[in-house]
Image (cartoon, rainbow, N blue to C red):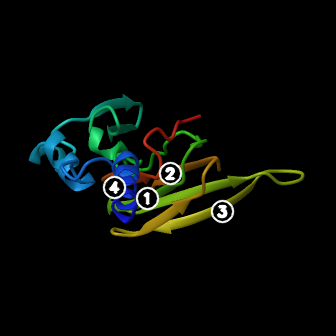
Amino acid sequence: MVMAKSSMLVAVILVLFGTASALSPTAQLRSTSSDFEYNLAFHHRTESFKMGAHRTRTLNESTAPILRMFDIQSSIEHVSLNGHKNFRVHSHPRAAEVIHVESGNLTVILLFEGFPSVEKVSNSLLRHGVGIVPQGIPHTTQCESKDGCTYVSYYNNANPGRV
């Protein structure tokens, strides 16, 4: 009787968790990805977009599939903005944004609904400065430097959207 119960328990464990020979999540990841996939350098593979005074290079789930694995669920964007120019006002309906300034002096402007007008919150970020834009909040970035600005935006969603 004890032997039958222990065999049944082993059978239940195997059904619920798979066999002992099943790969661990780490081994599964290693077996399906190359060393190259862990290198998120922008020059390797990006979607590039140029519009007016800015250029963006994006790493997302289509250009770097590892970003959608194991709850990473993120995307990264490298932005070059011409001197004394701004990025158009936009929002990200599915993600918050963390902005890290690589070069230049960048102003991040958040636009909040207000009565009777829109309330602006401006934050100046110097080189290596970091700012946060909450999910869904309209915002823009403005380069205050004559030589231009570069920054990296990190999103907590593999597809943050842009409206």
Element assignment for label 1: strand
Three-letter residue code for mark 4: Ser
Gap in angstroms between the C-alphas marked 3 and 4 = 65 Å
Q: Nearer the viewer, mark 3 or mark 1?
A: 1
> Could you tell me residue 118's position as x and y percent?
77, 51
Left or right side of 157 for 47: left
Sequence-earlier tag: 4 or 1: 4
Mark 2 sits on what residue? 141
Q: Which mark is residue 7?
A: 4
Q: Earlier in the sequence, mark 3 or mark 4?
A: 4
**Which of the two discs, 2 and 3, labels the residue nearer the N terminus?**
3
Q: Disc 3 or 1, which lies upstream in sequence?
A: 1
Residue at point 61%, 41% (across, down) = 93
Residue under label 3, please give it: 121
- Does 56 sit left or right of 95 as displayed? left
Disc 2, SS: strand
Work out whether mark 4 precedes mark 2 in sequence or the reverse, and give the earlier one. Answer: 4
